[in-house]
Amino acid sequence: MAIVFERPKSLLDVSTSYCPGCTHGVAHRLVCEIIDEMGIEGDTIGICPVGCSVTAYDYFGCDMIEAPHGRAPAVATGVKRANPNKFVFTYQGDGDLAAIGTAETVHSATRGENITVIFINNTNYGMTGGQMAPTTLPNQVTQTTPYGRDTKIAGFPVRVCEMLATLDGTALVQRTALDSIAHINDCKKAIRKAFKYQQEKKGFSIVEILSTCPTNWGMTPLESLERIKNEIIPYYPLGVYKDIDAED
């Protein structure tokens, strides 16, 4: 019988700790598929900070390093400079990358550090109970905004891709989503391009992935996918915000 679908070899065969319906597992699989297809597992180093991604080292077969909250780009910078021929990626959530790690994100991007950033945006602090994050939508109910995010008090959400696309050091800035097969396929293509650009030493690449958080959103997995489609994508439009090759 022909095998038409199987687990990527660099995605370890272990039980998951993620909540039912969480799309972290899909994102992990896409990264691992690219690692397998490029044949680079032994040359890849992943950096995961605090957040739901804190357990990612349990799932990736490549070398993994744990970073303090928000500091993954800084750790990745050191790892890549010390090992310039290795593939170095960070795997970060929105509370991590766009809040406590804003400075590390922006400055590693503007320096053009030759790393790949996988940015999971589920519009809340997933691991710690669903508090408001920098990416929480206006009027979105969270544990710390029980009446909805009031922009007069909490300000507006941070659009990371739009911000980083203005920096000279970025090579690829793209926003994707995991709400449909078509978008998942687009996400994989973006991750592949980000790793390819690192291989070609083109600079900093970030792939933002709009992801679900059924537990903290108080939704079923299917309802969460619909929320991405109907609420999150309209506020965070998908697409390529910067591609250094397209500018040539």
Image (spheres, helix red, strand yellow):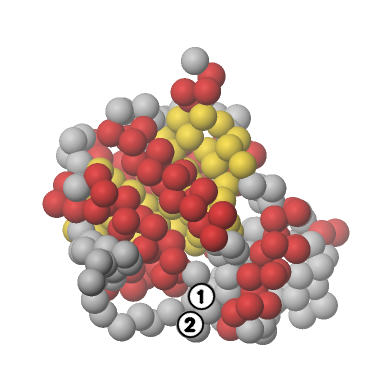
Residue at numbered disc 1: 22
Give the residue displayed 26% in from the left and 49% down from the top: 37
Q: Position of residue 100 (x, y in %)?
A: 51, 57
Q: Is residue 11 visible?
A: no
**Could you tell me which secondary element the residue under label 1 belongs to?**
loop
Give the residue displayed 28% in from the left and 33% down from the top: 199
Q: Amino acid at mark 2?
A: Cys
Q: Nearer the viewer, residue 208 or 127?
A: 208
Mark 1 crowdedness (10 Å alpha carbons): few <14, some 14-19, many ≥20: some
In the orientation shown, which residue stands out farthest toward the front?
1
Q: Position of residue 5 (x, y in %)?
A: 32, 66
Q: Amino acid at mark 1?
A: Cys
Q: Nearer the viewer, residue 5 or 49?
A: 5
Q: Position of residue 19 (x, y in %)?
A: 48, 82
Residue at numbered disc 2: 19
Q: Which mark is residue 207?
A: none
Instruction: Calculate the distance from the C-alpha at mark 1 to the C-alpha at mark 2.
Output: 6 Å
Q: Is residue 30 visible?
A: yes
Is the C-beta separation of discs 1 and 2 under 8 Å? yes
Q: Nearer the viewer, residue 187 or 74?
A: 187
In the orientation shown, which residue stands out farthest toward the right?
152
Q: In the rendered image, which quarter is residue 67 located in?
A: bottom left
Above or below, 164 against 89 in this view is above
Give the residue displayed 79% in from the left and 62% down from the top: 138
